[in-house]
Image (tube, grey):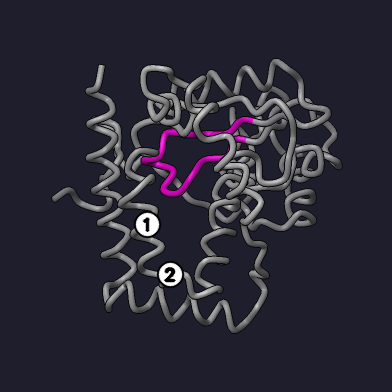
Amino acid sequence: MACPHTLGLTPGASINHLRFTSDLGKALRDADLVQENGPEREAFKIKLFAEIDAKTPPAAMLASSSSGITMSRIQSECAHPERTVIGHPFTPPHLIPLVEVVGGAKTSPETVQRALAFYTKMGRHPIHIKKEVKGHVGNRLQAALYREIVYLVEQDVVSVADVDAAVHLGPGLRWGLMGPNLLFHLGGGAGGMTHFFEQFTGPMTAWWADLGNPSLANPELQEKFIKGVQEEVAGRSFETLAHERDELLMGLLKLLAGKG
Protein backbone atom coordinates (compact mmCIF):
# COMPACT_ATOMS: atom_id res chain seq x y z
CA MET A 1 0.00 0.00 0.00
CA ALA A 2 1.40 3.37 -1.04
CA CYS A 3 2.09 6.08 1.48
CA PRO A 4 -0.79 8.62 1.39
CA HIS A 5 1.77 11.44 1.15
CA THR A 6 3.33 10.09 -2.07
CA LEU A 7 0.25 9.06 -4.05
CA GLY A 8 0.25 10.77 -7.42
CA LEU A 9 3.80 12.11 -7.26
CA THR A 10 5.75 12.13 -10.52
CA PRO A 11 8.88 9.94 -10.30
CA GLY A 12 11.71 11.98 -8.84
CA ALA A 13 9.37 14.61 -7.41
CA SER A 14 9.35 15.48 -3.73
CA ILE A 15 6.96 17.38 -1.49
CA ASN A 16 10.11 18.81 0.09
CA HIS A 17 10.34 21.14 -2.91
CA LEU A 18 7.27 23.00 -1.67
CA ARG A 19 7.73 26.31 0.11
CA PHE A 20 5.13 28.09 2.23
CA THR A 21 4.78 31.73 3.19
CA SER A 22 2.08 33.99 4.59
CA ASP A 23 3.65 36.97 2.76
CA LEU A 24 1.60 37.38 -0.44
CA GLY A 25 4.08 39.79 -2.01
CA LYS A 26 6.96 37.40 -1.42
CA ALA A 27 5.00 34.49 -2.88
CA LEU A 28 4.10 36.41 -6.02
CA ARG A 29 7.26 38.40 -6.69
CA ASP A 30 8.89 35.99 -9.17
CA ALA A 31 5.86 33.90 -10.15
CA ASP A 32 5.40 32.65 -13.72
CA LEU A 33 1.97 31.23 -12.93
CA VAL A 34 -0.36 31.67 -9.96
CA GLN A 35 -2.99 29.01 -9.15
CA GLU A 36 -5.43 30.68 -6.77
CA ASN A 37 -7.35 28.41 -4.37
CA GLY A 38 -9.07 30.88 -2.04
CA PRO A 39 -12.55 30.50 -0.51
CA GLU A 40 -15.43 30.22 -2.98
CA ARG A 41 -16.79 33.71 -2.30
CA GLU A 42 -17.15 36.10 -5.22
CA ALA A 43 -16.27 39.35 -3.41
CA PHE A 44 -13.22 37.71 -1.84
CA LYS A 45 -11.93 36.38 -5.16
CA ILE A 46 -12.45 39.71 -6.95
CA LYS A 47 -10.43 41.53 -4.30
CA LEU A 48 -7.74 38.83 -4.12
CA PHE A 49 -7.29 38.69 -7.91
CA ALA A 50 -6.91 42.46 -8.11
CA GLU A 51 -4.18 42.22 -5.48
CA ILE A 52 -2.47 39.29 -7.18
CA ASP A 53 -2.63 41.16 -10.50
CA ALA A 54 -0.92 44.17 -8.92
CA LYS A 55 1.91 42.13 -7.34
CA THR A 56 2.92 39.68 -10.07
CA PRO A 57 5.34 40.14 -13.00
CA PRO A 58 3.60 41.32 -16.20
CA ALA A 59 4.17 38.00 -18.00
CA ALA A 60 2.69 35.83 -15.22
CA MET A 61 -0.52 33.91 -15.93
CA LEU A 62 -3.18 34.05 -13.20
CA ALA A 63 -5.46 31.01 -12.89
CA SER A 64 -8.32 30.45 -10.49
CA SER A 65 -9.51 27.10 -9.14
CA SER A 66 -13.00 28.53 -8.64
CA SER A 67 -15.62 25.78 -8.63
CA GLY A 68 -18.26 27.91 -10.29
CA ILE A 69 -17.70 31.67 -10.21
CA THR A 70 -17.06 32.99 -13.71
CA MET A 71 -13.74 34.60 -14.62
CA SER A 72 -15.58 37.62 -15.99
CA ARG A 73 -16.62 38.39 -12.42
CA ILE A 74 -13.28 37.48 -10.83
CA GLN A 75 -11.24 39.60 -13.27
CA SER A 76 -13.58 42.61 -13.02
CA GLU A 77 -11.18 44.74 -10.96
CA CYS A 78 -7.88 43.57 -12.47
CA ALA A 79 -5.67 46.03 -14.31
CA HIS A 80 -4.53 43.21 -16.64
CA PRO A 81 -7.55 40.90 -17.01
CA GLU A 82 -6.27 39.52 -20.32
CA ARG A 83 -3.89 37.18 -18.44
CA THR A 84 -6.52 35.71 -16.10
CA VAL A 85 -8.27 32.38 -16.64
CA ILE A 86 -10.20 29.66 -14.82
CA GLY A 87 -8.13 26.49 -14.33
CA HIS A 88 -10.54 24.34 -12.33
CA PRO A 89 -9.26 20.94 -11.14
CA PHE A 90 -11.20 18.23 -9.31
CA THR A 91 -10.62 16.71 -5.89
CA PRO A 92 -8.15 15.11 -5.35
CA PRO A 93 -6.38 17.38 -7.88
CA HIS A 94 -3.05 15.53 -7.69
CA LEU A 95 -4.78 12.42 -9.09
CA ILE A 96 -7.80 13.48 -11.16
CA PRO A 97 -6.61 14.39 -14.68
CA LEU A 98 -9.41 16.77 -15.69
CA VAL A 99 -8.89 20.55 -15.59
CA GLU A 100 -11.56 22.93 -16.90
CA VAL A 101 -10.11 25.97 -18.67
CA VAL A 102 -12.48 28.92 -19.09
CA GLY A 103 -11.67 32.43 -20.20
CA GLY A 104 -13.49 35.54 -19.05
CA ALA A 105 -14.86 38.36 -21.17
CA LYS A 106 -11.45 40.09 -21.12
CA THR A 107 -9.21 37.01 -21.21
CA SER A 108 -7.01 36.86 -24.30
CA PRO A 109 -7.15 33.79 -26.57
CA GLU A 110 -3.39 33.47 -26.03
CA THR A 111 -3.91 33.04 -22.28
CA VAL A 112 -6.44 30.27 -22.85
CA GLN A 113 -4.02 28.43 -25.16
CA ARG A 114 -1.18 28.98 -22.72
CA ALA A 115 -3.26 27.48 -19.90
CA LEU A 116 -4.23 24.46 -21.99
CA ALA A 117 -0.57 23.87 -22.89
CA PHE A 118 0.56 24.25 -19.28
CA TYR A 119 -1.91 21.76 -17.80
CA THR A 120 -1.18 19.31 -20.62
CA LYS A 121 2.54 19.52 -19.88
CA MET A 122 1.74 18.90 -16.19
CA GLY A 123 0.17 15.57 -17.18
CA ARG A 124 -3.42 16.76 -16.80
CA HIS A 125 -6.27 16.53 -19.34
CA PRO A 126 -7.51 20.10 -19.82
CA ILE A 127 -10.73 20.84 -21.68
CA HIS A 128 -11.61 24.25 -23.12
CA ILE A 129 -15.05 25.40 -22.00
CA LYS A 130 -16.08 27.82 -24.72
CA LYS A 131 -18.80 29.75 -22.88
CA GLU A 132 -18.99 30.86 -19.26
CA VAL A 133 -21.71 29.20 -17.15
CA LYS A 134 -22.03 29.02 -13.38
CA GLY A 135 -20.38 25.83 -12.12
CA HIS A 136 -18.52 25.34 -15.44
CA VAL A 137 -19.27 21.82 -16.76
CA GLY A 138 -18.13 19.11 -14.34
CA ASN A 139 -19.85 20.64 -11.32
CA ARG A 140 -23.05 21.28 -13.26
CA LEU A 141 -23.12 17.59 -14.21
CA GLN A 142 -22.51 16.60 -10.58
CA ALA A 143 -25.20 19.02 -9.41
CA ALA A 144 -27.73 17.64 -11.90
CA LEU A 145 -27.17 14.07 -10.73
CA TYR A 146 -27.13 15.07 -7.06
CA ARG A 147 -30.43 16.94 -7.38
CA GLU A 148 -32.11 13.68 -8.38
CA ILE A 149 -30.25 11.76 -5.66
CA VAL A 150 -31.58 14.22 -3.06
CA TYR A 151 -35.09 13.95 -4.49
CA LEU A 152 -35.10 10.14 -4.42
CA VAL A 153 -33.91 10.05 -0.80
CA GLU A 154 -36.36 12.81 0.18
CA GLN A 155 -39.22 10.77 -1.30
CA ASP A 156 -38.04 7.60 0.52
CA VAL A 157 -37.49 5.83 -2.79
CA VAL A 158 -34.05 4.66 -1.63
CA SER A 159 -31.66 5.00 1.33
CA VAL A 160 -28.52 7.14 1.32
CA ALA A 161 -26.27 4.07 1.23
CA ASP A 162 -28.26 2.36 -1.51
CA VAL A 163 -28.35 5.41 -3.77
CA ASP A 164 -24.55 5.59 -3.44
CA ALA A 165 -24.40 1.92 -4.45
CA ALA A 166 -26.75 2.61 -7.36
CA VAL A 167 -24.22 5.10 -8.73
CA HIS A 168 -20.81 3.63 -7.97
CA LEU A 169 -21.72 -0.02 -8.61
CA GLY A 170 -23.90 0.82 -11.62
CA PRO A 171 -23.35 3.57 -14.18
CA GLY A 172 -20.48 5.04 -12.15
CA LEU A 173 -18.32 2.03 -13.02
CA ARG A 174 -18.84 2.68 -16.72
CA TRP A 175 -18.30 6.44 -16.35
CA GLY A 176 -14.82 5.73 -15.03
CA LEU A 177 -14.01 4.12 -18.38
CA MET A 178 -15.87 6.16 -21.00
CA GLY A 179 -18.10 9.21 -21.14
CA PRO A 180 -21.92 8.95 -21.34
CA ASN A 181 -22.07 9.66 -25.08
CA LEU A 182 -19.70 6.83 -25.99
CA LEU A 183 -21.48 4.51 -23.54
CA PHE A 184 -24.89 5.31 -25.03
CA HIS A 185 -23.36 4.71 -28.48
CA LEU A 186 -22.42 1.23 -27.26
CA GLY A 187 -25.85 0.89 -25.64
CA GLY A 188 -27.36 1.34 -29.09
CA GLY A 189 -25.74 -1.89 -30.21
CA ALA A 190 -24.62 -2.25 -33.80
CA GLY A 191 -26.78 0.73 -34.73
CA GLY A 192 -24.81 2.94 -32.35
CA MET A 193 -26.07 6.38 -31.37
CA THR A 194 -28.68 6.36 -34.14
CA HIS A 195 -30.35 3.28 -32.69
CA PHE A 196 -29.96 4.63 -29.16
CA PHE A 197 -32.09 7.68 -30.08
CA GLU A 198 -34.63 5.47 -31.83
CA GLN A 199 -34.88 3.23 -28.77
CA PHE A 200 -34.62 5.62 -25.82
CA THR A 201 -35.77 9.10 -26.90
CA GLY A 202 -39.30 8.41 -25.67
CA PRO A 203 -38.41 6.78 -22.34
CA MET A 204 -35.66 9.25 -21.47
CA THR A 205 -37.86 12.24 -22.29
CA ALA A 206 -40.51 10.79 -19.95
CA TRP A 207 -37.91 10.30 -17.19
CA TRP A 208 -36.70 13.88 -17.61
CA ALA A 209 -40.25 15.13 -17.13
CA ASP A 210 -40.52 13.13 -13.89
CA LEU A 211 -37.25 14.31 -12.29
CA GLY A 212 -37.56 16.05 -8.92
CA ASN A 213 -36.62 19.53 -7.75
CA PRO A 214 -35.98 19.30 -3.99
CA SER A 215 -34.74 22.07 -1.70
CA LEU A 216 -31.22 21.35 -0.48
CA ALA A 217 -31.69 24.06 2.18
CA ASN A 218 -34.27 21.94 4.04
CA PRO A 219 -32.74 21.25 7.52
CA GLU A 220 -34.70 18.01 7.98
CA LEU A 221 -33.52 16.74 4.60
CA GLN A 222 -29.92 17.70 5.40
CA GLU A 223 -30.14 15.77 8.67
CA LYS A 224 -31.48 12.74 6.79
CA PHE A 225 -28.37 12.76 4.58
CA ILE A 226 -25.97 13.43 7.47
CA LYS A 227 -27.39 10.47 9.40
CA GLY A 228 -27.37 8.27 6.31
CA VAL A 229 -23.75 9.09 5.46
CA GLN A 230 -22.65 8.51 9.05
CA GLU A 231 -24.22 5.05 8.89
CA GLU A 232 -22.46 4.40 5.57
CA VAL A 233 -19.11 5.58 6.98
CA ALA A 234 -19.52 3.05 9.80
CA GLY A 235 -16.88 4.57 12.04
CA ARG A 236 -14.14 4.86 9.43
CA SER A 237 -11.98 7.97 9.75
CA PHE A 238 -11.78 10.70 7.12
CA GLU A 239 -8.15 9.74 6.49
CA THR A 240 -9.06 6.07 5.98
CA LEU A 241 -11.82 6.88 3.49
CA ALA A 242 -9.66 9.39 1.59
CA HIS A 243 -6.78 6.93 1.33
CA GLU A 244 -9.11 4.18 0.10
CA ARG A 245 -10.48 6.54 -2.56
CA ASP A 246 -6.99 7.58 -3.67
CA GLU A 247 -5.68 4.01 -3.88
CA LEU A 248 -8.65 2.96 -6.02
CA LEU A 249 -8.22 6.03 -8.23
CA MET A 250 -4.56 5.23 -8.76
CA GLY A 251 -5.46 1.68 -9.75
CA LEU A 252 -8.06 2.87 -12.23
CA LEU A 253 -5.73 5.49 -13.72
CA LYS A 254 -3.03 2.86 -14.20
CA LEU A 255 -5.51 0.63 -16.03
CA LEU A 256 -6.63 3.50 -18.23
CA ALA A 257 -3.02 4.48 -18.97
CA GLY A 258 -2.31 0.98 -20.19
CA LYS A 259 -5.40 0.56 -22.35
CA GLY A 260 -3.57 1.69 -25.50
Q: Quadrant of residue 176?
A: top left
> How many neighbours does mark 1 have within 10 angstroms: few (below 14), some (14-19), or many (20 or more)?
some
Q: Alpha-carbon neighbours of circle 2 within 10 Å: few (<14), some, or many (≥20)?
A: some
Rendered location of residue 164, percent (x, y): 38, 61
For this view, does 154 lie left or right of residue 174? right
Question: Where residue 206 appears, x then y in whole percent?
Answer: 61, 47
The amino acid marked with disc number 2 is: Val
Q: What amino acid is found at the position of numbered circle 1 in the picture?
A: Ala
Q: Earlier in the sequence, mark 1 or mark 2?
A: 2
Quarter of the image where the C terminus is located:
top left
Report the side of 122 relative to 202 (left or right).
left
Q: Main secondary structure of the magenta part?
A: loop
Which residue is labeled 2 in the image? 158
Instruction: Judge whether 30 appears above or below 93 on screen.
Output: above
Provide the residue designation for mark 1.
166
Range of the magenta residues?
A: 87-101
Q: Are marks 1 and 2 in contact (CB under 8 Å)?
A: yes
